[in-house]
């Protein structure tokens, strides 16, 4: 079975998470500069089998677009064009950053580690991926 990868796209950084080959567990993987994301994904997809890219869909509480929505839509279209054999889906990411922070606190992560740039991004990506898996959309 192929893995699923999830992206929490930001202006500067993108958090990345992936499933295990059996698609049971979502695990934080990495954080990369958003400008280097395509190169990172090309290398990742060359080393292992992936079938789906889940992208966090940034929405406001009322369901409308956030200030990051346009960036995410453009990158989603680009990913669909660059990786045409991959399924590319959007997953609501409201509250993922808050849930990620609480998850890091609950797991006992030290305050200094939680402050590291990128930690919350990859944990948010894992939460987005877990939400997608729990929705049974795959």
Image (cartoon, grey):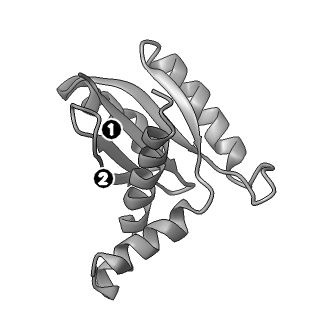
Judging depth in this view, the residue of 59 and 11 nearest the camera is 59
Quote the CA–CA distance across marks 2 and 1: 10 Å
**SS for callout 1:** helix
Quick check: 136 left or right of 77? left
From what the image shows, is residue 71 above or below residue 23? below
Q: Earlier in the sequence, mark 2 or mark 1?
A: 2
Q: Is residue 32 above or below residue 83?
A: below
Q: Decide: few, some or many residues near mark 2? Use Cα within 10 Å; few <14, some 14-19, many ≥20.
A: some
Residue at the extreme left = 47
Where does the image place residue 26, in percent across and percent down from the top left? 32, 47
Residue 14 position in % (x across, y down): 45, 51
- Quick check: 40 left or right of 70? left
Asked whether the beta carbons under mark 2 and mark 1 sit within 8 Å of each other, the answer is: yes
Residue at screen point 45% across, 42% down = 134
- Which quadrant of the figure contains the N terminus? top left
Q: Residue at x 27, y 81 (%)?
A: 108
Decide: few, some or many residues near mark 1? Use Cα within 10 Å; few <14, some 14-19, many ≥20: few
Residue found 40% across the figure and 43% down from its top: 36
78 up-or-down from 10: above or below: above
- In the rendering, which numbered label is found on residue 30? 2
Asked whether residue 113 is in view, the answer is: yes
Q: Please, which residue is most extreme toward the bottom here?
A: 111
Residue designated by label 1: 40
Question: Dividing the picture into quarters, in which one does residue 133 lie?
Answer: top left
Q: Is residue 116 visible?
A: no
Residue 59 lies, with reference to residue 88, above or below; the image says below
Q: Position of residue 122 (x, y in %)?
A: 38, 57
Q: Is residue 117 left or right of residue 77?
A: left
């Amino acid at each position: 079975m192929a893995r699923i990868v999830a992206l929490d796209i930001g202006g500067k950084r993108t958090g990345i998470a992936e499933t295990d080959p059996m698609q049971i567990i979502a695990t934080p993987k990495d954080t990369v500069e958003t400008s280097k994301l395509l190169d990172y994904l090309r290398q990742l997809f060359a080393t292992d089998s992936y079938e789906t890219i889940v992208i966090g869909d940034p929405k406001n509480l009322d369901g409308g677009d956030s200030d990051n929505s346009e960036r995410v839509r453009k990158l989603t279209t680009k990913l669909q064009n660059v990786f045409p054999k991959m399924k590319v889906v959007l997953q609501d990411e409201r509250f993922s950053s808050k849930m990620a922070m609480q998850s890091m606190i609950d797991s006992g992560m030290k305050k200094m580690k939680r402050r590291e740039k990128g930690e919350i991004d990859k944990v948010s990506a894992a939460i987005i991926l877990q939400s997608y898996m729990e929705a049974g959309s795959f």
